Amino acid sequence: MAAISAALVKELREKSGAGMMDCKKALVETDGDVEGAVDWLRKKGLAAAAKKAGRVAAEGLVGVALDGSRGAIIEVNAETDFVARNENFQEFVRGAAQLALTAGDDLDAFMKVAYPGSDHDVAGQLTQMIATIGENMSLRRMAQLSVSDGVVASYIHNQVVPGMGKQGVLVALESTGDKDQLAALGKQLAMHVAAAQPLAVDRDGVDPSELDREREILSDQARASGKPEEIIAKMVEGRLRKFYEENCLLEQVFVIDGETKVGKAVEKTAKDLGADVKVAGFVRFKLGEGVEREESDFAAEVAATLGG
């Protein structure tokens, strides 16, 4: 049997896009014949559909879907911005977002849901996209919002096509008031969330761990002034009020007019409608947010695989 070198595996991986272990197995099966190994991988369905795991997928699209009192948002990543312009990719994002309206919040379970108009589940359809386009892709996250009575509105920033872009926001409003007026307010609030990036709707919604972290930072800063502890406590509470004003949606200054607090704008709409309006929640997805881009030593990776 021919010796399977790291260079041979690298060559096959570059030709096929398949994973290293699959490339090694293919070369073993074909006695080191690279072209034969490519055919072997294709027959096994591994060449075109292999996820190129060594490449970071931080581009792609955020997509939203709305259905009155329900809304869904998903992020589908790819390696290059070019893919966001691909109509097949856009169709997948559109279909997956629509499917997410009724599929629950569990991403793993969602990947197993049958994809409409195909013989695949969502994961299988994504694999088909990878095979067709030839880039690593992932359906990274999804979320839903719904209200019993009211609307879920959306906003897409840097829109590529309707309902898809680089950043997406959903806002849920509970109210018995006129749905068109609620939707107009919801759209404005979603635009605000995209710009101001609040952490929570109100003070009660702030993550306790985030609040503890902020309190600790402010306390340390105040102690550096050398003031007594009772003065420090007052300083911290004062600065926490500013933290809430900067990070709680209802306490932020509304970007639409630059003057009114968001809470007051909601109250005004409620008065105009003659019905209570409650901001039930919001979700904001920014494309690639938090994805770490790591450089790897490919030669070392191949050598480690072959030595295993």
Image (cartoon, rainbow, N blue to C red):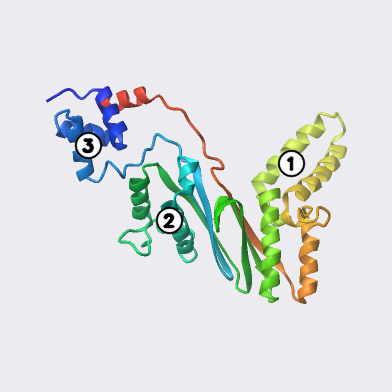
- Per the image, the residue denoted by label 3 is 38
In the rendered image, the quadrant that contains the C terminus is top left
The amino acid type, in three-letter code, at marker 1 is Arg
Q: Distance of mark 2 from mark 3, alpha carbons?
A: 28 Å
Which of label 2 and label 1 is nearer to you?
2
Q: Which residue is mark 2?
A: 92
Q: Nearer the viewer, mark 3 or mark 1?
A: 3
Give the answer, above or below, for where 111 lies relative to 148. above
Which quarter of the figure is the N terminus placed in? top left
Q: Amino acid at mark 2?
A: Phe
Report how far apart the C-alphas of labels 2 and 1 lie in the structure.
Answer: 44 Å
> How many residues crowd mark 3 within 10 Å: few (<14), some (14–19), many (20+)?
many
Rendered residue at 35%/64% (across/down)? 117
Q: Is residue 266 above or below residue 45?
A: below
- Residue picked out by circle 1: 215
Position of residue 271 measured from the top left corner of the image (x, y, whole percent) = 80, 72
Q: From what the image shows, is residue 151 above or below residue 80? A: below
Residue lying furthest left: 1
State whether residue 249 appears in this view: yes
Who comes first in sequence, dot 2 or dot 3?
A: 3
Q: Check residue 184 in the rendering and tell me which mark sits there, or answer none.
A: none
The reply to whether callout 2 and callout 3 are in contact (CB within 8 Å) is no
Please provide percent x and percent y for residue 268: 80, 67
Q: Kindly report the distance in space between the C-alpha atoms of the residues bearing marks 3 and 1.
A: 58 Å
